[in-house]
Amino acid sequence: MDDRTSKGTEVAVLIPAAGEGTRLGGRRKQFRVLGGKSMLVQTLDVFERHPEVDHIIVATPAEAVRPLRQELRRIGITKLMTVVSGGLTRQDSVAAALAETPDSVEVVLVHDAVRPFVRLSQVSAVIKAAREQGASALAVPVTDTIRKGKDEMFGETIPREKLYRMQTPQGFRRTWFQEAHAEAREKGSHATDDVDLIQQKGLPVQIVPGGELNVKITTPEDWERATQFWPMWEEILHLEAREREVMTEAK
């Protein structure tokens, strides 16, 4: 047992990947190939590389549980704890993955399976804020003008100064997150995202600056941009790896 396990300070990442992905068309979007690997695997690689992440738990369609578990272990996702059958909703899938999280985990991260362009530094910032504040999430301030609309006519403008576009990962103290899911299950309530569950308990959530690159690939237009950007992303990953090597050598 390592020191973090004995102190109960581990980090687990939950990846809900059971969605149909119908807006992108064709096969489920999380299994579409991007840069030679499925989008899901490219996303998992981020957390496989992150030094603070100890466990990865994936929730997937029931028929994919066994083959995906075998495939991820074959290709070397060493932090994979298990693959579980997801539910009808994202909230159900997250709950199924959360149920497999060991008590040695202090912080739970939830990350979209189709958001592969997240930086290691962003993951670190979410983990740090979750440890210190109990809950945190990446978000980007809204810069566009936002108006209400009805019957194809514009209404009032919504002040954007306090509006944010939510991203993942979102990080939580494990005990908070388990309590939030238990209460939602008892009440039969549903949340728009995991932050919403925490806020329903009246708990604070720290804003962590996100980035424009950390997009959720949902539409055909998203997919086209992602495939065009991938070669540049690989260069970014190469530079990050080199920076880590230099820092390690300096120590």
Image (cartoon, rainbow, N blue to C red):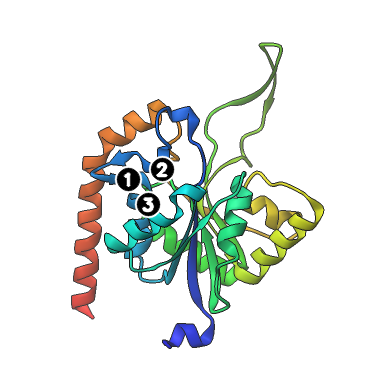
Tell me the element at label 3.
Answer: helix
Q: Mark 2 Cα within 10 Å, few/some/many (few <14, many 20+)?
A: many
Q: Which residue is mark 2?
A: 30
Q: Compare residues 197 and 97 and report the one nearer the observer.
A: 97
Disc with the residue nearer the chain's start (2 vs 1): 2
Q: Which residue is mark 1?
A: 38
Residue for point 75% across, 55% down: 184
Q: Compare residues 37 and 87 and report the one nearer the observer.
A: 87
Would you say the residues marked 2 and 1 are in contact, meaning their CB atoms lie under 8 Å apart?
yes
Residue 147 visible to an observer of this rendering: yes
Q: Separation of disc 2 and disc 1 at Cα?
A: 7 Å
Disc with the residue nearer the chain's start (3 vs 2): 2
Percent across and percent down for residue 70 are 35, 60
**Which disc is residue 43 wearing?**
3
Q: Quadrant of residue 81?
A: bottom left
- Outermost residue, top side: 152
Q: Separation of disc 1 and disc 3 at Cα?
A: 9 Å
In the figure, is residue 179 to the left or right of 121? right
**Which disc is residue 179 wearing?**
none
Amino acid type, mark 1 = Ser
Percent across and percent down for residue 199 are 71, 55
Disc with the residue nearer the chain's start (1 vs 3): 1
- Outermost residue, right side: 187
Residue for point 69% across, 54% down: 197
Amino acid type, mark 2 = Gln
